[in-house]
Image (tube, helix red, strand yellow):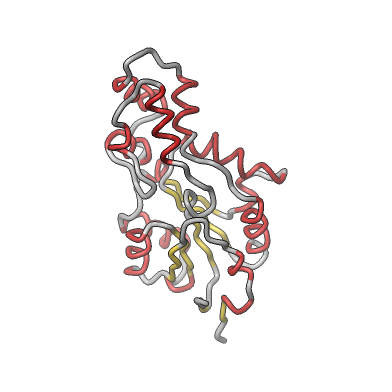
């Protein structure tokens, strides 16, 4: 079992760590809308083209929808685009919400995500509301790519987070499912854990996972 020492803050990625993803279904849904070859722009670990511009906050929701329409072979409504794009995100298991609730009693929790307003404000927010709470009840701070105009694994997004939080890098634990993101955080002295697909995160509640040296 991996152990972490003197942790005060835990940083969580969103997709693939907390919320389950279904990229194949999302691609299929786009094809059913008459939009081919969309898979050339999408992956579980980072987007490209106008999808990346959307996550960087360089284009807004209306511009994003219009870019989607350029690929289409038939008229598509805003709602169809939104629902199809949000089908990339599935569910957050209740067990993970309970883990966050317990961790927040001991640690500062941060959400650091390459995301966009549709995914966060529609899909993710609804999933975090399942226990009668809001997403803000689970985290003390949010570092979102589309607000910061930065994305992982670029060093600048981690540097900005560390500057804002004013803590020593080795007091942070970062959980992500993307190896490049983990490697970048490691270079900056942040303790890290690479989350495997469908991994049970209950080990975070084990007292032996965290060690404190006086």
Farthest residue to the right: give it: 132
Relative to 31, is 109 above or below?
A: below
Q: Quadrant of residue 75?
A: top left
Give percent across and percent down for residue 47.
33, 42
In the rendered image, the quadrant that contains the C terminus is bottom right
- Judged left or right of residue 28, residue 153 is left
Residue 191 vs residue 1, the one in the foreground = 1
Give percent across and percent down for residue 70.
29, 20
Relative to 133, is 160 above or below?
A: below
Farthest residue to the bottom: give it: 214
- Judged left or right of residue 88, residue 74 is left
Residue 92 vs residue 107, the one in the foreground = 92
Who's the residue at 67% across and 64% down the image? 105
Who's the residue at 62% across and 50% down the image? 93
Q: How many marks?
A: 0
Who's the residue at 41% across and 47% down the image? 114
Give percent across and percent down for residue 21.
48, 45
Give percent across and percent down for residue 1.
52, 77
Who's the residue at 63% across and 64% down the image? 103
């Amino acid at each position: 079992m991996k152990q972490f020492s003197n942790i005060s803050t835990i940083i969580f990625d969103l997709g693939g760590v907390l919320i389950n993803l279904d990229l194949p279904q999302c691609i299929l849904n786009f094809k059913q809308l008459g939009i081919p070859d969309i898979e050339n722009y999408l992956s579980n670990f980072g987007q490209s083209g106008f999808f990346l511009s959307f996550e960087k906050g360089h284009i807004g929701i209306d511009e994003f929808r219009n870019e989607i329409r350029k690929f289409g072979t038939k008229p598509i409504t805003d709602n169809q685009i939104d629902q199809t794009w949000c089908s990339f995100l599935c569910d957050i298991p209740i067990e993970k919400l309970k883990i966050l609730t317990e961790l927040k009693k001991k640690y500062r929790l941060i959400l650091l995500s390459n995301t966009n307003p549709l995914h966060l404000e529609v899909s993710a927010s609804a999933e975090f509301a399942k226990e009668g709470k809001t997403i803000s009840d689970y985290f003390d701070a949010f570092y979102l790519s589309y607000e910061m105009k930065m994305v992982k694994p670029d060093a600048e997004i981690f540097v900005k987070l560390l500057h804002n939080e004013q803590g020593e890098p080795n007091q942070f634990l970062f959980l992500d499912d993307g190896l490049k993101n983990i490697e970048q955080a490691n270079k900056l002295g942040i303790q890290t854990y690479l989350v495997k697909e469908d991994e049970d995160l209950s080990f975070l509640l084990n007292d032996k996972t965290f060690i404190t040296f006086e």
